[in-house]
Amino acid sequence: MLLRVLVVRILHLIPVLLGVSLIVFSFIHLTPGDPIEMMMGEAGGVTEEEIDALRHQFGLDRPLPFQYVRFVVNAARGDLGISITDQRPVAEVIRERIPATVELTFCSLLIALIVAIPIGIISAWRQHSALDTGATVGTLLGVSLPGFWLGIVLIMIFSMRLEWLPVTARVDYGVGFSSITGFYLIDSIVTGNSAALASALRHLVLPSMALGAATAAITTRIMRSSMLGVIRQDYILFARAKGLSETAIALRHALKNALIPVVSVVGLQIGVLLGGNMIIETVFGWPGLGRLAVDAIYARNYPVVQGVVLLYAVTYVFVNLVTDLLYAVLNPRIELR
Amino acid sequence: MKTFWRRFRKSRVGVVGGVMLILMIVSAIVTPVLWPHDPVTGDLRLRLRPPVWKDGGDWSHPLGCDQQGRDVLSRLLHGARVSLLVGLVVVVASAAVGTLLGLLAGYFGGWIDAVISRTVDILLAFPFMIFAIGLMAVLQPGLLNIILTLTLKGWVPFCRLVRGDALAAKGREHVEAARALGAGHRHQLFREILPIVLPSVIVLGTLTVATVILLEASLSFLGLGVQPPTPTWGGMVSEGREYLIEEWWLSTFPGLAILLTVLSVNLFGQGMRDALDPHLQE
Amino acid sequence: MSSHPLLRVRDLTTYFFTDLGVLKAVDGVDLQIGRGETVGLAGESGSGKSVLGRSILRLIQPPGRIVGGEVLFEGEDLLAKTEGEMQNIRGGAIAMAFQDPLTTLNPVLSVGPQIAEAVRLHGVRADDGTTIPSTSRWAARQRALEMMRSVRIPEAVQRYRQYPHEFSGGMRQRAVLATALACNPSLLIADEPTTALDVTVQAVILELLREVTCTHNTSVLLITHDLGVIDHFCQQVAVMYAGRIVEWGPTRSVLSEPMHPYTEGLLNCLPRLDYESVIRPIPGEVPDPLNLPEGCAFHVRCPHTMPVCAKTEPRVAEVGEGRWVRCHVYEKGISAGGSGSG
């Protein structure tokens, strides 16, 4: 049953992925400036023939549809072009930065969920209590805060005034550290380097909070309202009539039902997180994909920009697939279309 | 209509938000005229003057001056114009486009729906900031391009909402009755179905204003929005970053302005939601 | 009737404190159910019968609250018990089943475990009153399967793992009954068990109910608006109107010779299949529970109303063998020739 859902969803993906690639391709193609000239930069002394030869080599003198197909095929093979500023393959540049961003996004999501789900559940079960009112105010603020500003305020308070937590980078300079996977948390655990682990965690705290705040707020709200809806249902009354304790009812009967809409929302939020980490990485100087994209656009390093865009879009499409599957697991009633 | 206002007034949250919003809009429109300081060119002698409650500050520049000697309050008020203008224009445009496409998709179905829905799915695959950065590489930053970029992503939620509602509304009795009486497509779409979907569109619209303001601020923060020297809140926060230690107010106040504006829009939107859908849950 | 009834409700009062006022859902109700006895609680929507059922098990949530009375179950007042003690009783000694089986069962959990759940908590009560604890998962599952078979759900083992939406309506209600009866309660409160079902399925469910409860001597409080069901199934009947019991007695007797004008009126509303009759609806409407009339709540619609009816509420009077009526017409022996109307 689940397999059928999987197959159907994957089939739906294909036109979407094609559309995504088409959009990115048009972004690439519409950017001002000639890519060959930009690559050559100020080199000068390059003859017309050499430029033409390069153009031919990159297939830039062929008709558009051909170029598009070439683009898609290359992208599927992992070839995203050459970075203008440092002449390395875009794919390589991107790959270096992926762990940093993944770590940050993952931690932000984790913090957001750890905060949001219990608070949402308890707020619903104890409506109008102090916690509930506090949560309502908090979520309202959380969705109204600009993330970059929150980041800056956190830096001001915790880094500058209180000097508790660091501002930039992922690990303190001078902490002897060898990176294997690029995921500093995993690496430090694997190599048993507790100083590095502590340092990496300290560096993760503020950016994760800044990035995760809005997600926490939205998730709390949806968890709460979903749970409120579930509490009113007849099957909850029936569970009570069977003599189950309130905790057992909340966890065994209510939670699974209430989580269903939450899963969808969290899936959407991951998209927001992926977008938001551009900002947060800039604020905190975090060496991830987001900052790479921002730096690249300032430097007019368009191949890198579009490479990142393509990667994000494709990733997000697959994230949505996983969300859909999770939804189907939780809700046995859904039919396939 | 009257019941709407009555219900809206009952929502304290909505009223508070509405009042705040009106205050802000008024101050954005009127006060730059009344508050004479030039937000664009500064007097370097006034460079980094502190706000009124610190030593060296005075009431002529109650929120101090920035690194180019420009009055912060004046820049805030002019920045409000940008944010509110972008917010309003983008939402109106997005709602218009999205509602129209949603109506067409929901009502006609078939290949029209297929094309529109596919487009929606494809656009949804891009997180907004990613889309913006890709598009900004093509278009250069500027007010019009910001509005365009935001609208290009902004119409999608409206389209989905209206499509769903239109599909449901298609089956409703008075729509069927109109069809039985020989009403044409145009009549059915705009006279029968549109009024049904409109309340949800309005609610979504108010909430989208909040999102748009935040996104515009984020883009401006990155320097991809409206360009200096035009003051934008996001831009001000970014410029103030160098001075976080001593002159912290340069980044704090614009951020607060964003927060308060978005908050009031959200409160107002909550009030609208309470007034338009008699809510079943708390 | 046994002198030690299983359940004895005295002056039970449940109010709902809403923004619009105080809703007197149950206003001083007396009720009695003996061991193995089936009692019907008849009334239309808004009469308070469902609230009464829930009040007995203390399932009332804010803004509702039980404000007075006694609910004596096996001699002990349930209203005085702690929530923990009530949780032991619910599902174990007293069980309740609700109207719509589709919403009563949790849609995201399999049916079988929902039946077994109660058994794991309470064990199974033997007919002589002792309890066989069945708290192991395996034993609970066996018991659940046993119950599914006794309510005639086919292919119980496959069905155990299935979800409620995979069952038909009648099967779902049978599953609900299986859940309620799993621990062999002394008292089953069934709130409109047949209302959501087609007529043919109704009959099956009722027969099932009778069979199962007779075998174990289970008492049943059957809450319904359908007098036909009560006639078929219940030994005693209580008629409820606007939060009060207005008539009470053996079913045969009450339904063939109704005394309270409301009971009369209810019976006149039923179309008869065996001979031509005129349906005479009761004039007026069910009163707004927030705004009950002064005096007797029914007097506004009553064909026998007297001046005193508008001023004071009638008290309960015994008018025969185990028959009680709450009506001024029968008070102090004043007889206005009321019984039986054409």
Image (tube, coloured by chain):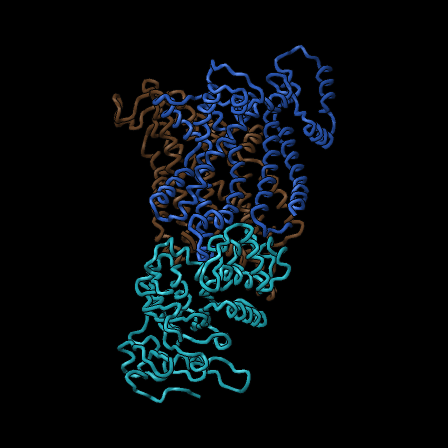
Chain colours: A blue, B brown, C cyan
Question: Can you say which quadrant of the picture contains the N terminus of chain B?
Answer: bottom left
Q: Position of residue C100 (x, y in %)?
A: 51, 63
Q: From the viewer's side, name the closer residue of B173 and B87.
A: B173
Q: Position of residue A79 (x, y in %)?
A: 68, 25
Q: Is residue B46 above or below residue C33?
A: above
Q: Is residue A28 above or below residue B279?
A: above
Q: Which residue of the protein is positioned furthest toward the top in this rendering?
A: A45
Task: Please name the residue shown 40% across and 76% down the image.
Answer: C1
The answer to whether residue A325 is visible is yes
Task: Please name the residue shown 61% across and 26% down the image.
Answer: A32
Q: From the viewer's side, name the closer residue of A245 and B221.
A: A245
Q: From the viewer's side, name the closer residue of B181 and A140.
A: A140
The answer to whether residue B236 is visible is no
Q: Is residue C22 above or below residue A328?
A: below
Q: Position of residue A253 (x, y in %)?
A: 49, 50
Q: From the viewer's side, name the closer residue of C63 and B261.
A: C63
Q: Is residue B7 above or below residue B84?
A: below
C143 displayed left or right of C37: right
Q: Position of residue A51 (x, y in %)?
A: 70, 17
| Image mark count | 0
Indicate the quadrant where residue B37 lies.
Answer: top left
